[in-house]
Amino acid sequence: MGLSLTTICAARASAKMSKQAADYQDQPHDGEVCSACCMFVPGNPDQCTMIGGVISPHAWCKFWQAGPNDTCS
Ligand code: SF4
């Protein structure tokens, strides 16, 4: 995907990445959805540890990673 772990960590340490930069879309991608991503943080509103803004559980972005919610570090 071309982004190093350092780049990702740096993005998390400062402001969250924009939805546009992450190719966020309001629909699943090949069966992958935010609600099954380890960066998804359920709440009111639902959020993501990496991407800024309100996140839909049915959305997706190119950084999707399988795992229990809010367990990626
Ligand atoms: S990192 Fe995971 S939870 Fe966050 S927007 Fe991308 S797919 Fe959704």
Image: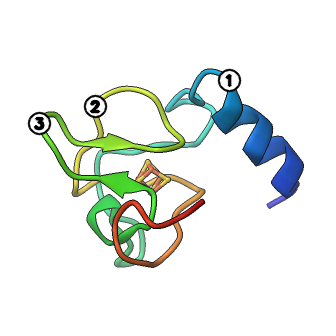
Q: Is residue 22 left or right of residue 54?
A: right
At mark 2, the secondary structure is loop
Q: x%, y% of residue 6?
A: 87, 48
Q: Residue at x 55, y 27 (%)?
A: 18
Quarter assignment of residue 29: bottom left
The disc labelled 1 sits on which kind of residue? Answer: Ser
Q: Which residue is drawn at 65% across and 37% down?
A: 12
Residue 9 versus residue 17 in the image, above or below:
below
Residue 50 versus residue 39 in the image, above or below:
above
Query: Separation of disc 2 and disc 1 at Cα?
Result: 18 Å
Residue, disc 1: 14
Q: Can residue 55 be seen in this view?
A: yes
Residue, disc 3: 44
Q: Can residue 3 be seen in this view?
A: no
Residue, disc 2: 54
Q: x%, y% of residue 63?
A: 59, 57
